[in-house]
Image: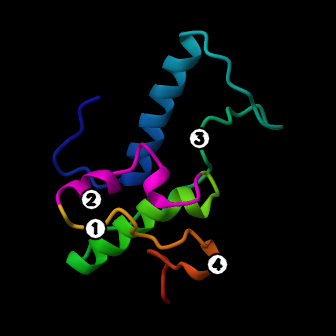
C-alpha cells in the first residue's frame, strides 16, 4: 500500500492497515474469533492518536509504554517484559535497570495524562 506524501488521515490509514492484515491472517487459515456482530476480535476497537510535542512529551509517552506491561499485570516490574525498549534505554544509560520502582500500579502514574 503506497500512501501519498500529504496523507494525514491516521484513522483511515490504520483502518486500511488493519483490514489488509486481518484479511491476510484469515486467508492464511489462522482462526480468529468474532464478536456478536460477526466482526473479528483481532484488534481493539479504538486507538488514541497523539502527536509528540516536545522532548518531555516524548519521555512521558516512552514511560507510559515501558510501564504498561506492569499496569496490565503481565509482569511485576518493567524490566521483566522481554519485548520492551526499556532494555535498550538501560543499555545506553538513559534509564536504570530498576526504573519503574517496585511495580505497584496504584502508586505509579507513568505517562498518564495529568489533565
Viewer-nearest residue: 63 or 15: 63
**Mark found first going from the N terminus, 3 or 4:** 3
Residue 54 in view of the camera: no
- Residue corresponding to mark 3: 43
In this rendering, would 111 be left or right of 8? right
The N terminus is located in which quarter? Answer: top left
Secondary structure state at the residue bearing disc 4: helix
**Mark found first going from the N terminus, 1 or 4:** 1
Question: Horizontal and vertical percent for residue 105?
Answer: 61, 72
Which residue is at 70% across, 34% downward? Answer: 39
Question: Horizontal and vertical percent for residue 38?
Answer: 76, 31
**Mark found first going from the N terminus, 4 or 2:** 2
Relative to 42, say whether 28 is above or below.
above
**Magenta stretch contains residue 85:** yes
- Residue corresponding to mark 2: 90
User: Where residue 50 is drawn, which disc sits there?
Assistant: none
Secondary structure state at the residue bearing disc 1: loop
Residue 99 position by quadrant: bottom left
Specify few, some or many for label 1: CA neighbours under 10 Å numbering under 14, 14-19, or 20 or more.
Answer: some
Q: CA distance from mark 4 to mark 2?
A: 24 Å
Stretch of the chain drawn in magenta = 75-92
- Tell us which disc is closer to us: 1 or 3: 1
Specify few, some or many for label 3: CA neighbours under 10 Å numbering under 14, 14-19, or 20 or more.
Answer: few
Viewer-nearest residue: 85 or 2: 85
- Tell us which disc is closer to us: 4 or 2: 2
Residue 37 in view of the camera: yes
**Magenta stretch contains residue 115:** no
User: Where residue 106 is drawn, which disc sits there?
Assistant: 4
- Tell us which disc is closer to us: 2 or 3: 2
- Residue corresponding to mark 1: 95
Amino acid at each position: 500500500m503506497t500512501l501519498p506524501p500529504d496523507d494525514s488521515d491516521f484513522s483511515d490509514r490504520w483502518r486500511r492497515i488493519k483490514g489488509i492484515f486481518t484479511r491476510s491472517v484469515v486467508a492464511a487459515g489462522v482462526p480468529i474469533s468474532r464478536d456478536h456482530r460477526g466482526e473479528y476480535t483481532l484488534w481493539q476497537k479504538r486507538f488514541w492518536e497523539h502527536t509528540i510535542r516536545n522532548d518531555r512529551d516524548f519521555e512521558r509517552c516512552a514511560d507510559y509504554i515501558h510501564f504498561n506491561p506492569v499496569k496490565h499485570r503481565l509482569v511485576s516490574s518493567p524490566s521483566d517484559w522481554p519485548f520492551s525498549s526499556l532494555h535498550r534505554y538501560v543499555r545506553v544509560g538513559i534509564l536504570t535497570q530498576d526504573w519503574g520502582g517496585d511495580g505497584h500500579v496504584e502508586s505509579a502514574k507513568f505517562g498518564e495524562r495529568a489533565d
